[in-house]
Image (spheres, rainbow, N blue to C red):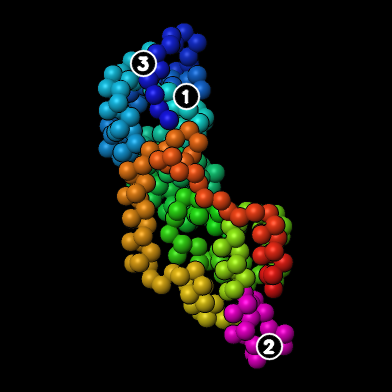
Amino acid sequence: MAHSFQNGVSRMNCHPEYYLRDGNITFHVEGTLFRVHRYFFERESLFFLQEFARAPQGGTTDTSAFRLDEVTATDFTKFLWVWYSPSYRRGSLSEPKEHWLTILELSTKWQFLDMKKLAIDELEKLDIEPIEKITTYDKHKIDKLLLLPAYKLLCKRTTRITDEEGEQLKIPTLLRIFEARERAGSAAEGRRTGPTSADADDEELEKILIDVFELNSRATNQQGAQSQARSDATSTPNVNGAANGHRPSGSGSVSEKKIARDRMP
């Protein structure tokens, strides 16, 4: 959470790239001062707009810098890159997956909706392992229709989900993958000896997954995402990662996940 920082700055280091002469807001992150343009934060983030309203003079000088907790100076640098990088302005974005995952994490935390969309668009261009993609998109409440390719890969592969992979997925996801594999295997029966979900027709498997994960239409899903975005914009994250005093829902016990994995065909 951002808050006004009133201590002296004798031990602070100014960031070599993002301490700008014409900047008008100063942030303190891990002993480093970033002086950038307030306009971006007010224009794109309700979270920062509210923080600035609580402390109108905060960040106007180095000694009153807004302190950002639970973020590293390295990650904040990646975040600022979106606005200040020449490659971004030219439209030549070729940063690695970890870079965009950081931007996705912070844009979600601080409610930068446009930047979150940019991060998702760039992640969609990259080759991400199915388990990692599913857990990442679920964590940040991203349109599940974008996970269809990942779901299909899990259903088509001939090996079972490992214990480590199962621990990363939520129980509902595990059970739905199991159901889709079972239904796809049944649909493929008669076409091959000993049919499995790997033998299912791609189009048929996609229909099964849309039904199992209740992805009836892109419009319906996008409407839900927009409602969630509006809900997120009216809540303020706290230091524990929950919103408005509510704890994040659990992802299932270890024993429940083991049962689900054992049922996988």
Q: Earlier in the sequence, mark 1 or mark 2?
A: 1
Q: Give the structural element (helix, strand or loop) at label 2.
A: loop
Left or right? Give the position of 91 relative to 178: left
Q: Give the structural element (helix, strand or loop) at label 3.
A: helix
Percent coordinates x, y for residue 60 in the rendering: 30, 18
Does residue 8 sit above or below 100 in this rendering? Answer: above
Q: Residue 192 got which mark?
A: 2
Q: Residue type at mark 2? A: Arg
Closer mark to the observer between disc 2 and disc 3: 3
The answer to which image quadrant residue 190 occupies is bottom right
Specify start and end residues of the magenta stretch as a single range: 181-198
Q: In which quadrant is the C terminus drawn?
A: bottom right
Q: Residue type at mark 3? A: Ser
Q: Name the residue tied to disc 3.
A: 64
- Find the distance from the CA under tag 1 to the CA under tag 2: 60 Å
Does residue 39 sit above or below 155 in this rendering? Answer: above
- Find the distance from the CA under tag 2 to the CA under tag 3: 71 Å
Q: Name the residue tied to disc 1.
A: 29
Percent coordinates x, y for residue 250 in the rendering: 56, 51
The answer to which image quadrant residue 135 occupies is bottom right
- Find the distance from the CA under tag 3 to the CA under tag 1: 13 Å
User: Is residue 225 something that shows in the picture?
Assistant: yes
Q: Give the structural element (helix, strand or loop) at label 1.
A: strand
Query: Is residue 130 part of the magenta span, yes or no?
Result: no
